[in-house]
Image (cartoon, grey):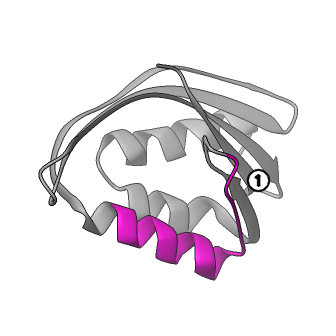
C-alpha cells in the first residue's frame, strides 16, 4: 500500500469519527506527537491516554471535515475543520493541519498546526 492510500485510510476513519481507532491502527509504538503549543508526547501508551482523555471530554461532534490532503515520500499532510461541544460547556472550533511522518506503514511523528 502506498503512502497516499495509508493517509486516505486514516483520514476516512477520522472523518467517520473513529479518531481513537485511527490512532490505534496507524500510530507506531514509538509515536511522537507535537501539539500547537509545542507540548510533546512520546510513546503510544502516553499518546493514546492523552487522546482518549480528549475524546472522552467531547459531548457532541458538530463537524469533522477533511479539506485536502497530500503526501510525498514519507510525509503526509491533512487539513481539517473540527467543531466539538465539550462536556464542560465550551465549544472548540479548529482549523488544523496535521503533518504525519511515516515509516513501514505507521506514523512515527505527528505535528498539529493551528490554522485559525
Q: Position of residue 99 (x, y in %)?
A: 69, 36
Provide residue 81's location: percent of width, then percent of height: 37, 26
Q: Residue at x 52, y 46 (%)?
A: 10
Quadrant of the image containing the N terminus: top right
Q: Report whether 6 appears left or right of 56.
A: right
- In the rendered view, tell whether residue 62 sits above or below residue 48: above
Q: Position of residue 109 (x, y in %)?
A: 76, 53
Q: Quadrant of residue 97?
A: top right
Q: Tag 1: Cα neighbours inside 10 Å, few (<14), some, or many (≥20)?
A: many
Question: What is the chief secondary structure element of the magenta stretch?
Answer: helix
Span of residues in magenta? 38-54
Q: Is residue 61 left or right of residue 12?
A: left
The residue carrying mark 1 is 109
The image position of residue 101, as x and y in percent, is 79, 45
Badge 1 marks a residue whose secondary structure is: strand
At x 53% / y 61%, what residue is drawn?
23
Depicted 111 relative to depicted 55: above or below:
above
Name the residue rendered at 83%, 58% in the picture.
Answer: 104
Residue at figure coordinates x 49%, y 70% from the top left:
50
Amino acid at each position: 500500500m502506498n503512502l497516499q492510500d495509508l493517509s486516505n485510510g486514516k483520514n476516512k476513519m477520522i472523518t467517520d469519527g473513529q479518531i481513537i481507532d485511527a490512532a490505534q491502527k496507524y500510530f507506531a509504538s514509538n509515536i511522537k506527537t507535537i501539539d500547537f503549543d509545542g507540548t510533546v508526547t512520546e510513546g503510544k501508551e502516553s499518546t493514546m491516554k492523552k487522546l482518549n482523555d480528549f475524546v472522552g471530554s467531547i459531548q457532541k461532534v458538530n463537524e469533522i471535515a477533511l479539506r485536502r490532503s497530500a503526501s510525498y515520500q514519507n510525509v503526509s499532510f491533512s487539513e481539517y475543520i473540527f467543531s466539538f461541544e465539550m462536556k464542560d460547556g465550551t465549544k472548540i472550533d479548529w482549523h488544523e493541519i496535521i503533518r504525519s511522518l511515516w515509516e513501514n506503514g505507521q506514523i512515527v511523528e505527528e505535528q498539529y498546526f493551528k490554522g485559525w
